[in-house]
Image (cartoon, helix red, strand yellow):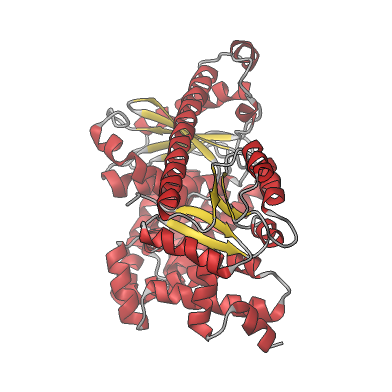
């Protein structure tokens, strides 16, 4: 048995011949994801949404014959493994097959031993190519890291272009912000981190919706460079997510410094110098883990907009009983204005009074007089630390109330259902959904069944099938397009699932209801 699945497209106008290949694949237990086409035109159409690694094609077919199809495929996919099988023992066909770098030319009826030998050889070739590709990717990653190291150490992009004339250095201009992640001890070189690095990177990719490049600088420091251009608030939220991932996986808090926006490869060194300098503040800021020079590159209107969004998020957190996010967003707002001597203290007091009002409005002993008294307190305090302590005390009182009355399982299930309904076309798995609501996969699976009466996979399938049915009845999209739109990569499996759900194939369902 092989260790993974390979995509194969079987093209023949005779269904019996296609069935023979399916039978032999099952007999020899080849792990193949099989799709079929009845003619050359259908092959080329399927290739718009389905890219197999292996094409097993007849020579004589309607519309486009096997040679014509293979010729077109060779232009688009030079590494695809092509196998011809034909009832014609014709030298010209064999010669054309060889010119297209076909793996083999098998005569019908297909000899089982020859089929087994050919497929085994093809899969070995694919494995070898994947290993080579993986090695090249790793080597390219090492070289990119080396280039970035050089830029951080103030080597100019002009000099690097001369040193590496064959390498495209355009990627260095794509970064616009960076995070410096700092631990007080040697962490990134530790056995603990190395053993769990893949898990960390997977969590990071799943939870951070951006293109980034992660690079270890030394045992206690790493950088994350971002290519996207989001609001500063987004970067603060992302820094909070990364800090949480580190804590959940390693039970350690990381210090994260956020750079200002920058353009150009030569600006990376200055951005790194900037974030290193910002991290010096951690000596004076006990309990604070996220740092940034927030106001140097944003306007006052942007500050107001970001604060308004943060306050709205806090209100939403309370309404959803999302205690973790409530605590995180409150900390972000407090950290944003701690040690901010460049802003008016009147504005800071105004924002924090609004925050306090939101927290108090949702407590059981809410009274207007209490809110007014709290506001007076905010304006009477002499130091920011006093305001911060007052707000955090109020926050913890509110959280205790939320914990007492919250229905955490029901809330988690509601969030999962909402996510599935919105992202049914994306990759969905129990692990991905569990990460969204900060539960273990097994616990989420159990409470989902208890609360809804069905398993998560069944629920995902029902949503996707309903969306597919809607698209069949309301659009002219092709079956292959609908398949991809609702989150399936295998058309045959999609059609089979649809038929199991509604008793008809997608095509017959569309025709019978229009």
Above or below for 413 versus 153: below
For the view shown, which residue lies furthest in the left direction? Answer: 191
In the depicted structure, whether residue 191 falls above or below residue 51: above
Q: Is residue 424 visible?
A: no
Horizontal relation, residue 239 to residue 105: left or right: left
- Give left or right: position of 228 versus 429: right
Q: Residue at x 65, y 14 (%)?
A: 158
Residue name at image x 45 percent, y 61 percent: 356
Q: Nearer the viewer, residue 390 or 109?
A: 109
Depth check, front residue: 361 or 127: 127
Left or right position of 289 against 504: left
Q: Position of residue 367 (x, y in %)?
A: 43, 76
Q: Measured along the vertical axis of the image, is residue 231 above or below residue 264?
A: below
Report the number of numbered marks: 0
Residue 49 rendering spot, x and y as whole percentages: 63, 58
Q: Residue at x 53, y 37 (%)?
A: 341
Q: Position of residue 283 (x, y in %)?
A: 35, 30
Residue 310 shows in the view? yes
At x 43%, y 76%, the residue is 459
492 and 285: which is toward the camera: 492
Q: In the picture, residue 173 is in which quadrant?
A: top right
The quadrant the C terminus occupies is: bottom right
Q: Can you give x and y, in whole percent of width and height, for residue 352 in the image?
A: 49, 55
């Amino acid at each position: 048995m092989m260790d993974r699945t390979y995509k194969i497209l079987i093209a023949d106008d005779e269904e019996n011949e296609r069935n023979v290949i399916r039978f032999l694949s099952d007999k020899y237990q080849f792990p193949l994801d099989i799709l079929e086409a009845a003619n050359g035109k259908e092959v080329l159409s399927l290739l718009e949404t389905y890219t197999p690694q292996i094409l097993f094609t007849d020579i004589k077919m309607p519309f486009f014959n096997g040679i014509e199809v293979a010729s077109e495929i060779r232009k688009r996919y030079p590494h695809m493994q092509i196998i011809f099988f034909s009832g014609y023992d014709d030298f010209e066909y064999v010669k054309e097959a060889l010119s297209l770098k076909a793996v083999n030319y098998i005569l019908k009826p297909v000899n089982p031993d020859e089929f087994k030998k050919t497929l085994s050889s093809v899969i070995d070739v694919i494995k070898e190519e994947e290993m080579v590709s993986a090695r090249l990717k790793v080597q390219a990653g090492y070289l990119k890291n080396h280039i970035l190291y050089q830029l951080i150490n103030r080597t100019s992009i002009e000099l690097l272009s001369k040193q590496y004339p064959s390498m495209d250095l355009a990627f260095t201009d794509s970064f616009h912000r960076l995070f410096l992640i700092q631990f007080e001890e040697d962490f990134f070189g530790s056995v603990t981190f190395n053993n769990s690095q893949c898990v960390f990177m997977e969590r990071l990719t799943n939870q951070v919706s951006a293109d980034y490049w992660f690079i270890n600088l030394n045992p206690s420091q790493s950088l994350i460079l971002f290519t996207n251009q989001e609001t500063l608030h987004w970067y603060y939220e992302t820094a909070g997510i990364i800090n949480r991932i580190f804590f959940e996986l390693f039970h350690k808090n990381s210090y994260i410094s956020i750079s200002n926006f920058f353009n150009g490869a030569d600006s990376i060194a200055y951005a790194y110098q900037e974030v290193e300098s910002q991290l010096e503040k951690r000596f004076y800021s006990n309990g604070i883990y996220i740092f940034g020079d927030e106001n140097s590159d944003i306007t006052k209107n942007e500050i107001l907009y970001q604060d308004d969004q943060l306050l709205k998020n806090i209100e939403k957190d309370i309404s959803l009983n999302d205690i973790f996010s409530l605590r995180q967003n409150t900390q972000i707002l407090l950290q944003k204005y701690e040690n901010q001597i460049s802003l008016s203290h009147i504005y800071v007091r105004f924002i924090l009074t609004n925050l306090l009002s939101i927290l108090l409005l949702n407590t059981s002993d809410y009274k207007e007089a209490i809110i007014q008294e709290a506001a007076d307190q905010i304006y009477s305090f002499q130091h920011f630390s006093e305001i911060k302590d007052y707000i955090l005390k109020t926050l913890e009182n509110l959280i205790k109330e939320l914990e007492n009355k919250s229905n955490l399982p029901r809330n988690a299930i509601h969030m999962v259902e909402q996510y599935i309904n919105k992202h049914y076309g994306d990759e969905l798995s129990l692990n991905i959904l569990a990460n969204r609501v900060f539960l273990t996969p097994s616990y989420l699976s159990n409470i989902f069944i208890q609360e809804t009466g069905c398993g998560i996979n069944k629920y995902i399938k029902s949503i996707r099938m309903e969306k597919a049915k809607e698209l069949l009845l309301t659009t002219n999209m092709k079956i292959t397009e609908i398949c991809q739109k609702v989150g399936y990569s295998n058309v045959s499996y999609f059609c089979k699932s649809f038929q199991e759900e509604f008793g008809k194939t997608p095509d017959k369902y569309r025709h019978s209801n229009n």
